Image (cartoon, grey):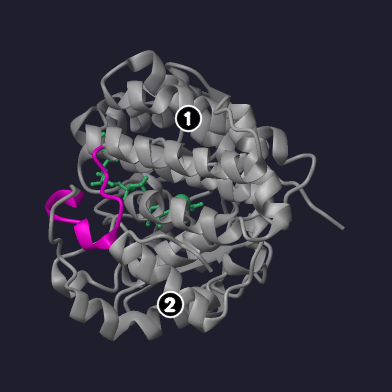
Amino acid sequence: MARFTLPRDLYHGKGTLETLKTFEGKRAMVCVGGSAMRKFGFLDRAVSYLKEAGMEVQVFDGIEPDPSVDTVMRGAEAMLKFQPDWIVAMGGGSPIDAAKAMWIKYEYPDIEFEDMIKVFGLPKLRKKAHFCAIPSTSGTATEVTAFSVITDYKKGIKYPLADFEITPDVAIVDPDLAETMPKKLVAHTGMDAMTHAIEAYVSTAHCDYTDPLAIFAIKMIQKDLVSSYNGDMDKRASMHNAQCLAGMSFSNALLGIVHSMAHKTGAVFEDQGAHIIHGAANAMYLPKVIAYNAKNPDAAARYAEIADYMGLGGASVEEKVQLLIAHLRKMNDELNIPQCIKHYGADSYPTEQGFVSEEIFLQRLPEIAKNAIADACTGSNPRQPSQDEMEKLLKCCYYDTEVDF
Ligand SMILES: NC(=O)c1ccc[n+]([C@@H]2O[C@H](COP(=O)([O-])OP(=O)(O)OC[C@H]3O[C@@H](n4cnc5c(N)ncnc54)[C@H](O)[C@@H]3O)[C@@H](O)[C@H]2O)c1
Ligand SMILES: [Zn+2]
């Protein structure tokens, strides 16, 4: 049996934040990140709309990028005190993901983090609250997905939580919120969305329901991401929709090892000053993983279909796969994203020698590879890597060398 789950309602288009005025309930907890939503006035607007709807409102703010288990526990405590019947999470993937995990702990105060990360093993939610997500970045699509990514900083590992129970009830995809994104964030989140769509299209769990969403999202991102990065606000609005379509697809088709590797390298070099931003990690690893997966003929044929849909040309499957890889690398260049970990420098920009030295990388490689194989996203990848292959693949992602195995 296959299941396809999305939020009950999705409001999209400029100004749809106002939909909050129509919500019914007694108490709403609004969860936000550091300061962007407050600074640009979206938080005040959301709070006043919810008050207009007759609700008592409390704000839980300060959720950090790549949220921690500790933040989740603090947020759940605040919810247990306030007893919201609506949780409204607004901002990038980080505050929305954190709020999803807080929701679980709020509904089941005795649950431990170790139980939350059992894939598709969550108990029924919605006994206390419903969940609305309002994204301000155009990438994670967590507003429509069954996932949340929480970092255990003691272990230096990002854990994906996965269960349709945490698919939000309502998503508000208002492009006004995405207009204030700085360029770098547009680049990273946009390539995250591209990775979602491509991984979903070749996933072993893809199906007739997920394919159209993925392939159309890929085309939109190909067409609009670089212009959005360069300041075209119509394209920025289009990217907000494209990332959401990609999310609808991957929430149901699942992902692959680009995400496994990004999850396991994101926080592991933190002590070297290199927090490898999720979207940048995906952008660097995606071309390598395509080359690796394309050794499987079925996956190669799927990549060739993507290349055809993008209008990249090519006479054979092999040539089409190469053209897809070249196109994605060109997008990285246009978005000022490095092609490999070695060149990942300050502010995530390309540089000759980045934060992570060869010595540190090689020291930590076996453990990273082991953790990446164990990641929840590995199961739906078209090829199952051995420890040796994963280490070789990660080395290609460090040195930017050819994948020939
Ligand atoms: N749940 C999922 O399905 C899923 C999928 C992919 C990634 N993720 C996770 O999501 C997180 C990344 O989320 P993200 O890329 O959206 O970034 P983010 O939420 O971490 O935000 C990054 C920074 O951008 C700022 N910001 C956000 N919106 C802004 C705006 N409109 N204008 C100006 N500044 C703004 C934030 O304040 C923050 O400082 C990672 O932890 C990643 O692992 C989750
Ligand atoms: Zn992602």
Q: Is residue 347 magenta?
A: yes
Question: What's the residue type where badge 1 is placed?
Answer: Ile
Q: Would you say residue 27 is visible in this rendering? A: no
Q: Residue furthest front?
A: 315
Which of the pair 73/234 is nearer the observer? 234
Q: Which stretch did the figure color magenta?
A: 336-348
Please identify the quarter of the rendering in which residue 150 is found. Answer: bottom left
Q: Quadrant of the N terminus?
A: bottom right
Q: Nearer the viewer, mark 2 or mark 1?
A: 2
Q: For the residue carrying disc 1, how many other residues have a C-alpha within 10 Å: few (<14), some (14-19), or many (20+)?
A: many
Name the residue rendered at 40%, 62% in the picture.
262
Residue position for label 2: 391
- Left or right: residue 2 versus residue 243 is right
- Left or right: 75 as drawn, with respect to 323: left
Q: Is residue 19 above or below residue 333?
A: above
Work out how far the residue at label 2 is from the one at label 1, CA to CA, in angstroms. 30 Å
